[in-house]
Structures are given as C-alpha cells and as structure tokens.
Image (tube, grey):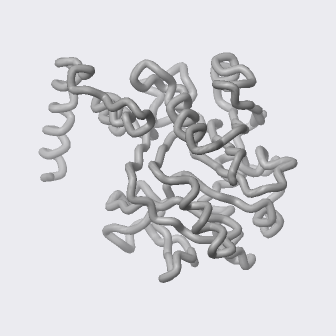
Amino acid sequence: MISTAIILAGGFGTRLRKAVPNLPKPMVNINNRPFLEHQMDYWIDQGIKKFILSVGYLNEIIINHFGHSYKGISLEYVVEESPLGTGGGLLNATKNLTETFLVLNGDTFIELDLNKIFEFHSKNNSIWTFALFKTDEVDRYMLMNIGLKGQIYSLNSHQSFKTGLANGGVYLIEPSALNLLDFVIGESASLEEQLLPNLISNGGKIFGFECQGKFIDIGTLFKFNLYESFCLFKCFSKSAIKPSDISIDVLAKVNNLLLNFKCKFGK
C-alpha cells in the first residue's frame, strides 16, 4: 500500500499572480480553504500517512500555515533555494525513499482510486505510472503516445492531434526509476520535457492509467475563476456543494464567463 506522497508546490504561479499576487499557487483560497488542504484531505482518505512538500516561492506561507503535521499526518518540507522546475523539484524530494511513492502536482487535481492505479502499476511491472485524462486542450497539455496495454512510448506534439490523453499530474514511482535518469538531485529539470524523455530513452518501462473522474487545473486565471465560482471542488469532500451555497454575484460572474467563452470559441 502507498503511504508517502510528494507534493510539487514550488512553482512561481506566474499565470495566477494577477488574481493571487501574494500566495504560492497551492495556497489559493477555494471555498474558504487553501487548495492544498482540499488536496491533502482527498489523499489522506485514501491512506496516505506522510506528505513531503517540495516548496520554493513564498514557501514560508505554506510552512507557517501547516507546520509539521496536518490532521495527525506527518509533513516534511524540501525547500528549493533556487528554482528547480517540476523534474528537479521531484528529484530533490526523493532522498531516502525506498518504497513506491505517490507524486502530486500542487496546482492540479484528478479524481481517481489509489488502489486501482496501484493495482495497474503492479500488474504491469511499471517503474513510473502516470494518471491520464482525456482532453481537447492540446495547446496547453502534453499528450502521450500510448500502446494498447497502456505503455507510454513518447510524448506527442501539441499540434499533431485534436484530442488525446494527457498527464493528469499524479504519478506512482518506483525508487529504481530514479537510477535510470541522467539527472542528479539538485539539478534543474522539467519533468515532461526532460525527465520523461530521458527515462524512456534509457529503457524505462512507464505506463499511463486513464482516469474517468474529474480533472481540475487552477494553473490559469480563467480556469481558477471558473472553478472557484462553480465550487467544483466538491469532488474533494464528501459533502456536496448546495445551490444555496453559491451567491447571486458569483452566478452572474460565471454566466458572463460562459457567455464570453461561447462568443469567443463558438461553443
């Protein structure tokens, strides 16, 4: 069973800075609580006992808010003294890990069953399994070239397809996968653009698990406003958001966003 999760929470949040100028991205307020709390709650319910937070930009806000435990769960911090990117931040947080571990992007959420992806991971003897979601936003998300049994062979160009399976920001990783990388701890690297191609070229057997649940991305201002307004984060908790919880001005804001979206894209 998976008990440890790394959360990549060290990014600058450049695209969201207009909306939340003084917060690291995972600390944006969703339904009166930081996004990071919602995310940790979801994975605690699935058995995670320890979180390692890879932090950088405004890291003191995260550390001061949570301290070293959350709801009885141990929290550890790995601070990036200089920006390391998603790949470098991941590697920096993997010291002393000897068992299969979970990795989560700090600004996205994907609804999935941890037991099911672990079963898929084990059945295929995968050393690195990606949670994937279907999307037509090929300009924003990197698509995966996947075989019939789910093995990932390469990344696809954004321009090659109209729809496909993209990285959902949740990974199951074996410590042995790190030995196949030509990158070392403390080195800056992109996960999708450098680590993953490097792992594949060095013979790493990696797989993609297609998820049917919701995918949420707070990484852009438009998406942040839309998801915040609709309170789509009800999938994080067992108590659903009631229509009465959404104010008239919020509904008006969402309606305007949707009208603008339809006018611009004809949808």
Q: Residue 195 appears in which quarter of the rendering? A: bottom right
Seen as rendered, the residue at the extreme right is 96
Residue 54 in view in this figure = no
Q: Nearer the viewer, residue 61 or 187?
A: 61
Q: Nearer the viewer, residue 172 or 28?
A: 172
Q: Residue 171 appears in which quarter of the rendering? A: bottom right
Quarter of the image that includes the N terminus? bottom right
Percent of width and height locating residue 211: 44, 60
| Left-right relation of 115 to 93 | left
**Point 65% across, 42% down: residue:** 48
* Vertical comparison of 83 with 252: above or below: below
Q: Residue 122 appears in which quarter of the rendering? A: bottom right
**Point 74% across, 62% down: residue:** 174
Residue 136 in view in this figure = yes
Percent of width and height locating residue 220: 41, 39
Percent of width and height locating residue 61: 64, 19
